[in-house]
Every structure is written in C-alpha cells, then in structure tokens.
Amino acid sequence: MSRPPQASALYDVPGPHARRRHLLYGLLSTAVLLGLAAWILYLLFDTDQFTAVKWRPFLYEGIQELLWKGLVNTLKAFALAAVLSLVLGAVLATGRLSDHRPVRWIATLLVEFFRAMPVLVMIFFIFVALKVQPLPALVTGLALYNGSVLAEVFRTGVHAVPRGQGEAAYALGMRKTQVMTFVLVPQAVRAMLPAIISQLVVALKDTSLGYLITYEEFLHAGKLIASNLDYDLPFIPVVLVISPLYIGLCMLLSWSATWIARRERRDPRTKGVDVAPAAPVPTLPGRE
C-alpha cells in the first residue's frame, strides 16, 4: 500500500478539491496525448507509410547486414567515446581540484574551451584539418566535449560531499590522494551517477553525427537505405526502425544506472553498522 504524501517546506499535501483538480488535469493531458498519437497514426496510414512495398527492403539479407553493421559501428564509437570521456573527465577534474594553481588554471582553460566548442565543429576540424579517419575523428570529438562536461560533474560531486568527511580524514593523517580515493570519491559517485549516465546518453545520441563525415554508423545505414532504393523513398519506415533502437539503447543505459544504484544500496559496506550499547565501566578500587 502506497504511503500518503508527506508535507514539507516545499510541498503542501493537496486537499480534496486540489486532488480532484489534479485528476482532471491528468485525464485531460492523457486525452490530448492519445489524440496526438491517433492523429500521427492517421497521417501515417493516410500517406501509405505502412504499405508492404515500403517495408519489403527490411526483409532482404543485404539490408539487414547493412543495418547490423551500422549498429555495431555505432556501439563501437560509443564504447570508445564513453571510456575516453570518463578518463578525460577524471583527469581534468583532478586538475581542477589540484592545490597547484598553474595545474588548476590549465585544467580550467581546457574544460571551458572544449565545453563551449560545438561538437560538430570539433569533429569536422579533426576530420578535415587534421585529416584523421572518420572513426578516430568522431570518437575524439565526442570524448573532448563529453569529457569536459563530465569533469565538471566529477568536481561538483566531490564538492557536494560534506566538508566534515574530508576534514576527519585529514585529521587521521591521510594524504590528499588517500582522502580523494577512499573517502570523497566513493561517496560522490552515488550522487554523480545520474548525471554521468545522462551525459553518456548524450554521447550515444551524438554518434549519429558520424554520418556527416562518412562514418558508416546506424544513421548512415538508414540514410543509404532510404535514398538509394527505388521503393518510393521509405524515409518514414526507416525512421520507425532506427528510432526505437536508439531509444532502447538509451533506456538500457538508464536501466543500468538504476540497477547499479540499487546494488550499491544493498551493498553491506554502504550500510550503517549496528553498534553495541555501551556496557557499564567497572569502577576503580576505592572509588565506590
């Protein structure tokens, strides 16, 4: 049985009239969304987007191999970009948290520059000006941008840990590296995880920019199918095939983050340890 909502400083429990009003708003919103979905389906059927001739190409083995190759290339680019982004973000965040002012300034300059630079511009510059192959150019551009954003996420997460945690560790004689490794970062990861996954989802979606530099990723494969086949240009069927896969991959990332968070909460190392009640201390002789 669900618990009733609790009032807080930022939330008042709605009364009977407010609950009925919210229910009405919910029903109206649902009706509008269902009407919009019905209208879109009507347009798709009215323009013959579900006719067999437009979906026939997906039954051919060559088309399936092309889509599979594009999907594998997309996952390859994303895996490389994700790993490099996390490593670069950790390095830049370490630089921004450094006690040495020159290191901190250089790291801040790199973070602000790559975070402000459009991803597509970096990809084109690496591909055209530096004459790098499509895959390395795409991965490098994604890693530079997402790594700079993740650097700020890491730095903010470390600063979000209560100061007393670090002060207590320093009071025990731990060095800064030990404090960061064993005290601050493990606690900050739990707070950073949603933002990290969100940025990795951005990196996954941005792999579609690879088709602009002729990298044969998933969107590039769909573009080839839609433009090179004499089936009355099946753009909509291609979109209806490719979009669910992109959405499914992003949802899989989000599900993985939820699973990791639940696993961390169940980890006995993250739970409080029951402390036995204090036993009476025997008095010293002559003190009774």
Image: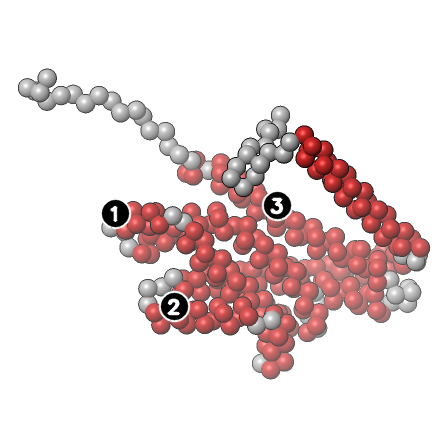
What residue lies at 52% left-to-right and 50% top-to-bottom?
A: 193
| Nearer-N-terminus badge (1/2) | 2
What residue lies at 84% left-to-right and 69% top-to-bottom?
A: 227
Q: How is the image coloured?
A: secondary structure
| Nearer-N-terminus badge (3/1) | 1
- Residue 154 place in picture, x, y as percent: 46, 57
Is residue 248 rendered to the left or right of residue 170?
Answer: right
Q: Quadrant of the C terminus?
A: top left
Residue at disc 1, secondary structure: loop
Q: Which residue is mark 1?
A: 172
**Type of the residue with mark 2:** Arg
Q: Nearer the viewer, mark 2 or mark 3?
A: 2
Query: Distance between the Cα atoms at labels 2 and 3?
Result: 35 Å
Q: Quadrant of the N terminus?
A: top right
- Residue 194 place in picture, x, y as percent: 55, 50
Is residue 245 rendered to the left or right of residue 114?
Answer: right
User: Looking at the picture, does residue 170 appear above or below residue 141?
Assistant: above
User: Can you see residue 182?
Assistant: no
Instruction: Name the foreground residue: 165 vs 230.
Output: 165
Residue at disc 2, secondary structure: helix
Residue 118, picture quadrant:
bottom right
Is residue 41 rendered to the left or right of residue 110?
Answer: right
Residue at disc 3, secondary structure: helix
> Label 2: few (<14), some or many (≥20) within 10 Å?
some
Query: Distance between the Cα atoms at labels 1 and 2?
Result: 26 Å
Residue 258: numbered disc: none
Q: Are marks 2 and 3 in contact (CB under 8 Å)?
A: no
Residue 104: numbered disc: 2
